[in-house]
Image (tube, rainbow, N blue to C red):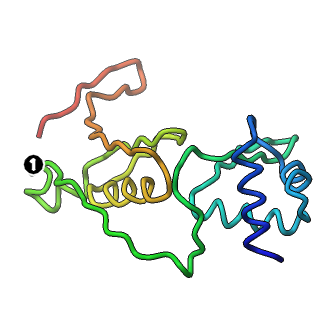
Amino acid sequence: MKSETTLECVELVLRQAKEPLSISAIGFNAKTTEAETREALRHLAQSGQIELIAGGRNGNRYTWLNTEKPVVSKDNEEPQEHAQKPVDAEFRADPNKEDQILLLLRVPKRKPRVIKGLNRAAKAAIGAVKNGAPSADVYVLQPVGSAVRGAIWKGANKS
């Protein structure tokens, strides 16, 4: 496979597409074989450049994420240092309490994730931004109450 030229052709087709494309449409427009197209898509997905849209019966479709991150092979990638913002001291005070905290990670164009533990949430947020997301927000989830059988509402216990 002429990896660089195929990768560049597939990237160009996806960048210019106005709607998500199937593998066969990408291969046709990029003038590449299906195997070359799949390999290029796999590389772009691993570098966080494209988004897979599950299509069910119609097959998967791919779209370019709006990022300015250049396509770089994993071999040539240089380690990047990302500054981590300090997290609320209230949660850092008790290490046992830190793993019990439920946090919500919200990344644009992704489903929200519930993560247990402050360190895991921070690493997941940084990872999402490294993979091309414009931002990643982390929120604390605090239980307010719960409903039990018999239509009874119990407020959260403050302990």
Residue type marked 1: Glu
Q: Is residue 35 above or below residue 144?
A: below
Q: Residue furthest bottom?
A: 75
**Residue drawn at 50 percent across, 53 percent down:** 132
**Within the image, what quadrant is residue 80 found in?**
bottom left
Q: Is residue 73 left or right of residue 128?
A: right
Which residue occupies the foreground of this view, 31 or 155?
31
Which residue occupies the foreground of this view, 13 or 155?
13
**Within the image, what quadrant is residue 27 found in?**
bottom right
Q: Position of residue 102 (x, y in %)?
A: 31, 46
Q: Which residue is mark 1?
A: 90
Q: Position of residue 18 (x, y in %)?
A: 74, 35
Q: Position of residue 32 (x, y in %)?
A: 89, 63
**Residue drawn at 83 percent across, 77 percent down:** 1
The quarter of the picture where the C terminus appears is top left
**Residue drawn at 25 percent across, 49 percent down:** 101
